[in-house]
Amino acid sequence: MTRALAFLVAAAALHSSVAAAQAVRPRSAAYLYASNADDARSVWVNPAGLAIVPDASVMAEIAVDNPPNQSLRVGQWSAALNSRGFSLGFMQDRLLDGQTVETLRFGLAVGFKGGGLGGSVSNYFQEADNSRSGDIGLMYHLLPSLTVGLVLQNIGRPVIADSVAPLTGVGGFSWVPLAQHLELSFEAHVSEKLENSTRQSWFRAGLTASTGGSIPVALIGALDLGSNMKVDALSLGLSVGANDRGILLGTGARRQDIELQRFSLSGVARRRPDR
């Protein structure tokens, strides 16, 4: 077993609205896409990815907040496992206003030639009334080098942290022009308009440039773009390793100067079920 270490350092969120609008957004969703998540983290991003690769996998993440004029604090932690397309995940979010939201998510996916179809059910436990929602997702390889992903999120419009989460559609693609060396991804998020909605559409684009080999070293970059296509957030990182990896993710937000807002440490392990 090869042990791997990955560092994903995100910086330069030019508007803090991205993080504020995604109060319980899993950290996995900050560097994975609906078209390329294919391990236990898929339950947080696109449940269809649970059936794309026949590996059993586990993941765990912990995020530390660096709020202005406050001490460092654990803001989120999560864990999930996936085996044969069935996944169970748990996440706890400690919001800056003192509320705690716990999410228990069940995912199930089936594979078919060229892709996968999956769904998940989330139960939110919080100080106010508990809530429930569902996601459904599709992932399909149009070409060996081109994968598309579609997700419908927040089915049931759950109330999370006193706000109604709008029904949101996510669609995107990942293109690998150089196998094992370069991957480009793009996705669009479109939400219904609700009274508490901060925005109805936004976009993400990113790349992974890798050395390949048995222990690949990769440069990772991602942009969050508003509906006006202006940059809301910029993420940069470095990844080392493949199946067994650790991920250090940092997010910076601009107040007067760019300041570190949140950083997290993650671990992912994958195994073939016959091993």
Image (cartoon, helix red, strand yellow):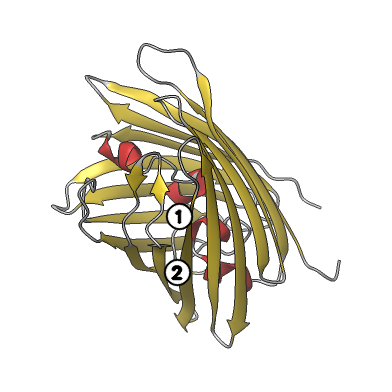
For mark 1, what is the residue? 208
Amino acid bearing label 1: Thr
Q: Quadrant of the C terminus?
A: bottom right
Residue sitting at x 70%, y 72%: 54
Amino acid bearing label 2: Val
Q: Residue furthest left?
A: 228
Q: Where is residue 121 in the image (x, y as percent from the top left)?
A: 54, 62
> For the residue carrying disc 1, how many other residues have a C-alpha within 10 Å: few (<14), some (14-19), or many (20+)?
many
Q: How far apart are marks 1 and 2 (CA)?
A: 9 Å
In the rendered structure, are the residues bearing label 1 and label 2 in contact, judged by CB atoms less than 8 Å apart? no
Q: Nearer the viewer, residue 40 or 167?
A: 167
Q: Is mark 1 on a helix, strand or loop?
A: strand
Q: Quadrant of residue 60?
A: top right
Q: Position of residue 139 (x, y in %)?
A: 48, 75
> For the residue carrying disc 2, how many other residues have a C-alpha within 10 Å: few (<14), some (14-19), or many (20+)?
some
Residue sitting at x 36%, y 30%: 252
* 230 to 73, vertically: above or below: below
Q: In which quarter of the image is residue 255?
A: top left
Q: Residue furthest front?
A: 129
Is 55 placed left or right of 144 in the picture?
right
For mark 2, what is the residue? 176
Q: Which circle marks residue 139 in the picture?
A: none
Q: Quadrant of residue 86?
A: bottom right
